[in-house]
Image (cartoon, rainbow, N blue to C red):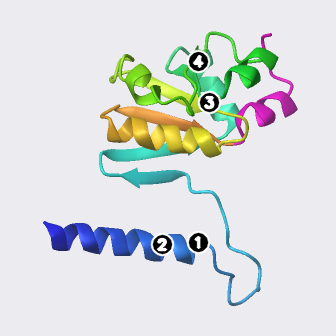
Amino acid sequence: MKTILHTFVALVSCLTMASCQTDGETGRSMQQAPTTQSTAQGIVEHKNVSECNALVTAGEAELLDVRTPGEWDRGHLANATFIDFYKPNFKEKVSELDKDQTYVVYCAVGGRSAQAANQMREMGFKHVINMKGGIKDWARQGLPIEQ
């Protein structure tokens, strides 16, 4: 089992390093945000604002805001659940959520939400989506934000 785990970690490391290289033919950067990311428990999807909005609008997913209280107070998405990623009790609060529900996790631009989504998958959540671009992309697209 250790050998399989070590092989998996090495493979992920190689893939991560390869995603930061340049294209040998064009010399252009090949850095692109992944659309999925493997964790020990499964896959975290990374979707853009339009895709996430469609899922939430269709009632197929719930929103989880993982920003700070100050960020939340400046504006948040309608019907979002708020759990501050930086609080020591983050995992405890998240564990109270339904693990069978689909969650679209968002923050300001997508970094914290990606980390939170990975933690949720490791905790056994079945379907977690990181909203690429976060609430900033949401606002740029003119979608509603509540105060």
Which label's residue is closer to the chain start, 3 or 4? 3
Position of the N terminus by quadrant: bottom left
Q: Mark 2 and 1 residues: CB-CB less than 8 Å, in contact?
A: yes
Q: Is residue 142 above or below residue 37?
A: above
Question: Looking at the image, which residue is at 67% across and 26% down?
Answer: 68
Where does residue 47 sit, x and y in percent of width and height? 60, 41
**Which SS class for mark 1?**
loop
Q: Is 140 on the left or on the right of 71, as rendered?
A: right
Helix, strand or loop status at disc 3: helix
Residue 4: which quarter of the image? bottom left
Could you say which disc has been placed on residue 15 in the image?
Answer: 2
Q: Position of residue 35 (x, y in %)?
A: 55, 52
Give, as a three-letter code, the residue at label 3. Answer: Cys
Label 4 near label 3: C-beta < 8 Å?
A: no
> Between disc 3 and disc 2, whose residue precedes?
2
> Please, what secondary structure does the residue beneath circle 2 have?
helix
Labels 4 & 1 near each other (Cβ < 8 A): no
Q: Which amino acid lies under the numbered mark 4 shown in the image of this protein?
A: Phe
Q: How far is the residue under mark 3 from the one under mark 4?
A: 17 Å
Q: Which mark is residue 84?
A: none
Q: Give the foreground label among 2 and 4.
A: 4
Tell which tag, 4 or 1, sits nearer the viewer: 4
- Circle 2: residue type: Leu
Kindly identify which residue carries mark 3. Answer: 52
